[in-house]
Image (spheres, helix red, strand yellow):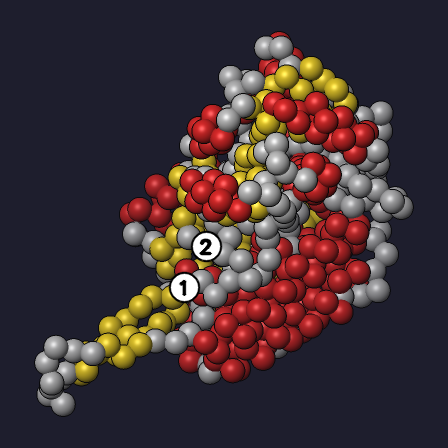
Amino acid sequence: MLHLKNPHLLTPFPFINGEWINCDEQFDVSNPSDQKVISSVGDAGLWGIEKAITSAHCAKKKWAQKTAKERSQILKKIATLLTENSDDLATILSSENGKPLSEARKEVLYGASYFDWFSEEAKRLYGDIIPMPTRDKRIMVIKQPVGVVAAITPWNFPNAMIARKIAPALATGCTVVLRPSELTPLSALAIGKIAQQAGLPDGVLNIVPTYAPEAAGELLCASPKVAKVTFTGSTRVGKILMKNCSDHIKKMSLELGGNAPFVVFEDADIDLAVEGAMASKFRNSGQTCVCANRIYVQSSIYERFKEKLSHKISALSVGDAFAPNIDTGPLIDQEAILKVERHIRDAVSLGAKVDVGGQKHGLGGTYFQPTLLSNVTHNMLIAHEETFGPIAPLIKFETEEEVLDMANDSNVGLAGYFYTQDISRAFRFGEALEVGMVAINAGSISSETVPFGGVKESGLGREGSKYGCDEFTEIKTMCFGNI
């Protein structure tokens, strides 16, 4: 049993139309640190999702008619309550996700920042008056909520990915049906408790955990009452959802897979680059869509960088999320372990060297040693597939032109990182990278103020920032004649 100051935040029931629903079918949610069951959660099933869609559809008119200030006040209250309950929410998050407690606390506060940010953006959905070429007409452009939003969120950030979607949706006057990952539904349901406490009207937010994600996705895409689908997850699933939404031409936001290049030029501050690589690569045990997946190091500094990075990786502490001074936790499940092992086997078979780690951790379960691979080449699997695990592969390069070609040689383009002290190169290389987000001399990108999203097969649309509300609105033109 989890030790919470507010035990009501741990709830195993779907949240539909302001009610917590008992379900005949249930599924277990386990702690990846020890595989122990945390709670059995009610499976909303297709009937529950249908009910949630109907509830959101019925609630959308009244919610859209609320003033921007009224919606803003509720979102601000949600942000405040998330912050006040951050310790309990982090405990729930660490238990079902496995990330260290300190990291989970940061995620909860990060999630709260989106509600705070969009509580202000709710009041800034400005339109335009457009000059006309004729004297007897005026054109007014307004932004209106798109309607019912289906949000499908992943397990790796079970608080922040939800906040980044539902905060702008609620701010713009949309209602939401949220289908969280079946691996981490408890954080989502806790947010439902917070939203209810903050005074969010019934039916505006509905949360439907289910252990049948494919069927749930098909239903959300097929329902004519759902106006928009927003999804964070794999490119493979994103393509399926996009096809399923095509029958109704639904508005979509897709934040999909990444394969982030991390480039270190010979004029870089090596120590700073090493710190950035550690921050990018090993957060959440490498299970992030923006983590460094391919680390390119210019040949003249390759050995020095490798030595410094090796020392840092060797010093990482692996363990249970609630143990003190832990840097990384377990991977989410056995499939994640198998993928990491497959990438290492392939790299070694083609000439890569394991400098640090490379094995399952002695703790057992889904723990894996933080790993450094050197002598990696661009023909290896790890250079073309997103690993989603704690492996840092080092690839040597000679020239800027060469590394740009390698960095852009990917069907996805979410994030990219590079280190240089040449201001001309900073602009030139940053603009040439085929990604949606670039960090220059920094190992992190994410913030509520930043437009988050990618290009190529990394998705559509942007989340967060002043642009985030646009994804949940429709632009309406109103022409006034005979003036």
Q: Position of residue 161 (x, y in %)?
A: 58, 53
Q: Secondary structure at mark 1?
A: helix
Which residue is nearer to you in this view: 107 or 13?
A: 107
Q: Secondary structure at mark 2?
A: loop
Pointers 1 and 2 in contact (C-beta within 8 Å): yes
Q: Earlier in the sequence, mark 1 or mark 2?
A: 2
User: What residue did someone put label 1 on?
Assistant: 470
User: What residue did someone put label 2 on?
Assistant: 462
Q: Quadrant of residue 182?
A: top right
Q: Is residue 369 placed above or below 322 in the rendered structure?
A: above
Which residue is nearer to you in this view: 97 or 3?
A: 97
User: Tag 2: residue type?
Assistant: Arg
- Residue 23 at least partly seen: no
Which residue is nearer to you in this view: 465 or 157?
A: 465
> Is residue 317 toward the left or the right of residue 92 in the image?
right
Q: Quadrant of residue 457?
A: top left
Q: Position of residue 284 (x, y in %)?
A: 70, 42
User: Tag 1: residue type?
Assistant: Asp
Q: Is residue 370 placed above or below 65 in the rendered structure?
A: above
